[in-house]
């Protein structure tokens, strides 16, 4: 086989392959012999039919098998001779496979990028200040109260925030109303378009009202945007949320707190810990951004596509929405691939990969917090497939600790 490297960019490699006629004939003969051993021909025992008869009957299948074998051999030979570290499955283009002529095609592969990371230090990284305000505390306490709220039936017209049970029907172009359907709706929660919510809030339980309603310009179904339809609404019942008072009794109900002041202190501490984690995450994001700006490198497009696909599967994105999701998520996926490559490169170069002892220590720590046996925690992580995830997290912690030690972390002004 002859290999000619074509113009390549970044991690892409394009190689022109030419297979001489003699090698093509040998591949076809090999494929024909294999066919002869497994097919039956009338008047002959299995494997005893003449080769010429086999080639005449299964000629196309034999040539296809020979082609696949030759492409596979070419790929393996290229990888071996050029010592390529392949990043994705190869593709072939411009195949020319004619009787009595050499086989030619272009082999396209992506290789793993070589990342030098010449500069990883000397950066000034701003870290957000941690400041939990009274308003932030009050908002979180309201969230806690909201979780303990109860819904009670109420008379009169509903308000924003109420839960209602309604029957809706829209008038069709024929002039008849469609089949009415019953819905639960939380007013103000975006579950119904604004015009229908306005209609509901003009009713008392048991009342029915018909009125034209205009569909919003940003309605998901483009064909319905801006249209006006007559809507018939029947309100069946209304429930209103009632949150408990923020007092010592409430504090004892939600946890092991003697007073509301103790609850507030615990909630503030939780907010501060979350703010610390958020600040850590932002610092990591910023240091990665500095490294990327100082160290350019190419990445395989296939890796980015794989990440997009994995997130689409995880988020259960419908097939009809995959194209829009891909367009929006592609820059995020590319950033994640680059980040992972930086972490992997530094972990290997600086010997920062999590050790078995690191993993054992973290599992022991987790077990102590849960009041469990470390062996049980290990078995649980292994069964759920989360050991690798934990090991990766420990490696990232070591890499980012090393990075932050190399750079100056400043508080935001």
Image: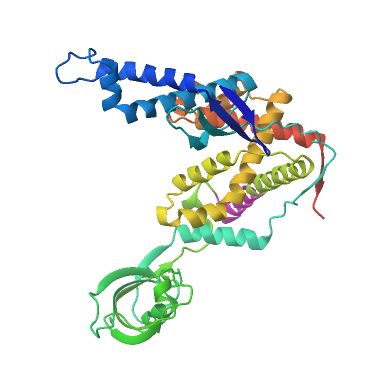
For residue 303, what is the image quadrant?
A: top right
Q: What residue is drawn where x is 26% and y is 27%?
A: 57
The colour mode here is: rainbow
Horizontally, residue 180 falls left or right of residue 17, namely left
Q: Position of residue 206 (x, y in %)?
A: 26, 81
The quadrant the N terminus occupies is top right
Horizontally, residue 372 falls left or right of residue 157, namely right
Residue 190 in view in this figure: yes
Q: Is residue 86 magenta?
A: no
Viewer-closest of 40 and 233: 40
Viewer-closest of 40 and 358: 40
Q: What residue is drawn where x is 37% and y is 69%?
A: 185
The quadrant the C terminus occupies is bottom right
**Magenta stretch, overall SS:** helix
Residue 377 in view in this figure: no
Identify the residue at the far right of this view. Answer: 122
Task: Answer above or below: position of 247 versus 206.
Answer: above
Q: What residue is drawn where x is 62% and y is 58%?
A: 137
Q: Position of residue 121 (x, y in %)?
A: 82, 36
Viewer-closest of 164 and 141: 164
Identify the residue at the far left of this view. Answer: 43
Task: Answer above or below: position of 41 versus 224.
Answer: above
Q: Is residue 270 magenta?
A: yes
- Range of magenta residues: 258-272
Count the marks. Answer: 0
Q: Position of residue 59 (x, y in %)?
A: 32, 27
For residue 53, what is the image quadrant?
A: top left
Q: Position of residue 369 (x, y in %)?
A: 54, 32
Viewer-closest of 413 and 367: 413
Task: Answer above or below: position of 41 versus 397.
Answer: above
């Amino acid at each position: 086989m002859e290999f000619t490297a074509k113009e390549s960019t970044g991690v892409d490699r394009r190689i022109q392959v030419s297979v001489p006629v003699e090698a093509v004939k040998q591949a076809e003969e090999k494929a024909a012999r294999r066919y002869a051993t497994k097919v039956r021909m009338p008047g002959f025992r299995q494997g005893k039919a003449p080769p010429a008869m086999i080639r005449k009957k299964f000629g196309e299948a034999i040539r296809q098998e020979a082609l696949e074998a030759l492409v596979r051999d070419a790929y393996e030979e290229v990888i071996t001779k050029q010592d390529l570290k392949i990043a994705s499955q190869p593709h072939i283009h411009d195949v020319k496979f004619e009787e009595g002529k050499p086989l030619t095609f272009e082999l396209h592969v992506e290789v793993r990028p070589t990342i030098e990371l010449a500069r990883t230090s000397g950066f000034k990284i701003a870290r957000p200040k941690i400041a939990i305000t009274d308003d932030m505390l009050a908002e979180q306490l309201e969230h806690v109260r909201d979780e303990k709220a109860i819904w009670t039936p109420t008379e009169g017209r509903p308000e924003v925030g109420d839960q209602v049970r309604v029957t809706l029907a829209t008038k069709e172009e024929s002039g008849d109303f469609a089949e009415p359907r019953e819905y639960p709706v939380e007013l103000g929660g975006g579950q119904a378009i604004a015009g229908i919510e306005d209609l509901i809030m003009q009713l008392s339980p048991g009342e029915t009202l018909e009125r034209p309603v205009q569909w919003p310009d940003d309605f998901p179904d483009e064909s319905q945007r801006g249209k006006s339809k007559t809507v018939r609404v029947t309100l069946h019942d209304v429930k209103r949320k009632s949150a408990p008072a923020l007092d010592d009794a409430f504090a004892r109900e939600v946890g092991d707190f003697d007073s509301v002041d103790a609850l507030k202190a615990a909630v503030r501490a939780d907010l501060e810990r979350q703010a610390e984690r958020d600040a850590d995450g932002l610092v990591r994001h910023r240091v990665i951004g500095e490294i990327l700006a100082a160290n350019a490198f190419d990445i395989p497009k296939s890796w980015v596509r794989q990440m997009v696909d994995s997130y689409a599967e995880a988020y259960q994105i419908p097939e009809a929405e995959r194209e829009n999701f891909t367009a929006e998520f592609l820059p995020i996926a590319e950033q994640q691939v680059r980040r992972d490559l930086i972490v992997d490169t530094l972990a290997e170069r600086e010997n920062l990969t999590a050790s078995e002892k690191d993993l054992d220590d973290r599992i022991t720590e987790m077990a102590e917090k849960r009041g469990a046996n470390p062996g049980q925690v290990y078995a649980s992580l292994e069964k759920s497939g989360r050991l690798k995830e934990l090991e990766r997290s420990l490696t990232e912690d070591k890499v980012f600790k090393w990075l932050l030690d190399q750079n100056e972390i400043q508080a935001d002004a």
